[in-house]
Image (tube, rainbow, N blue to C red):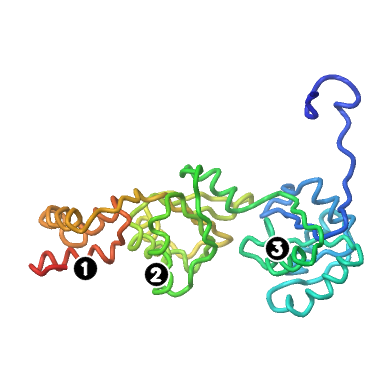
Amino acid sequence: MSDPLSHNSGEASRRAPAPQPPEPGLNIVSTPIGNLRDITLRALDALAGADRVYAEDTRVAGKLLAAYGLTPKLLAYHDHNGARIRPGILAALEAGERIVLISDAGTPLISDPGYKLVRAAVEAGHPVRALPGASALLTALAASGLPSDAFHFAGFLPSKSGARRNRLQELAAIPGTLIFYETGPRIAACLTDISDMLGDRETVVARELTKKFEEFRRGPAAELARFYAENGAPKGEITLLVAPGNGIVADDLDVDRELARLIPELGVKGAAIAVAQRTSLTKRDLYARAQALKDGDKP
């Protein structure tokens, strides 16, 4: 079988693929996460040939379309109007229209509206296809230096510390790199909670990906929390990555013995941190057990 990507000489091998207008149905199209050059030719074809383009924010989408001289019919689809306009979109699909759904940035449905629309289209038997492209979580993971063979994307963590800590506790034993989206004003508090609940794992703050001021800041979660507390909230979109824990689940006797061994040297807090880094247990629970041991009570 010949290789379709062969670079052998000849006119056929030098000819660029012909434009591919979107087919009838719902087309999920990825857009750049920052650098406008990070859009695929197929995405441009889909946007140019769509009967309708739906976007969460038409102002943001309008800038992208204007940059490439595209003028499709542009409409808003977001959490607040989705239930009202989904029937109309389904009717358009039934009529054979070419519908394109895009995100403000990156791959639609990833922490963006769209799931209910895709689900409804699938259940109604309409064609649904995804055109791959930019994604902040994959871009950050690729350059993070953290393990990429297994990872868990958890979207945005809760904004309040109590709920955020509970969620982190649920994720503590997952055997892979954890990936979150976060905002600048919350990053310092979020990193503090990560340090408290997951131990001082290696952490990466990826900011403004593909843009002029792209930045990767790496270090233990507590160290990064102190940096942002002292230097203020960073600007721009943030992807937060946390290295996997060891995931070792020790029995109660082993945990208590290890805490008792470390308390004289490290104190209650230090012992809890050290054991948390080697097990899937949380620092908060280990601190309570270590304090009880120090006080001479059974945890």
Vertical relation: 247 (above or below) 186: above
Looking at numbered disc 1 in the image, what kind of residue is underneath it? Ala
Q: In which quarter of the image is the C terminus?
A: bottom left
User: Of the residues tagged 3 and 1, which is closer to the observer?
Assistant: 1
The three-letter code of the residue at mark 3 reads: Asp
Crowding near the residue tagged with mark 2, few <14, some 14–19, many ≥20 C-alpha atoms within 10 Å: few
Residue 74 in picture, x, y percent from top left:
84, 67
User: Mark 1: which secondary structure?
Assistant: helix
Residue under the point 21% across and 62% down: 269
In this rendering, would 209 be left or right of 284? Answer: right
**Secondary element at tag 3:** loop
Quadrant hosting residue 285? bottom left
Q: Distance between the residues labelled 3 and 1?
A: 45 Å
Quadrant of the snapshot with the N terminus: top right
Q: Distance between the residues labelled 1 and 2?
A: 16 Å
Q: Mark 2 points at which residue?
A: 166
- The tag on residue 288 is 1
Is 298 on the left-hand or right-hand side of 275? left
Tell me which label, 3 or 1, sits earlier in the chain.
3
> Percent position (x, y) of residue 111?
61, 64
**Residue at the image position 75 percent from the left and 61 percent from the top:** 102
Quadrant of residue 143 within the rendered picture: top right
Location of residue 16 (image quadrant): top right
Tell me where residue 221 appears, x and y as whole percent. Answer: 38, 56
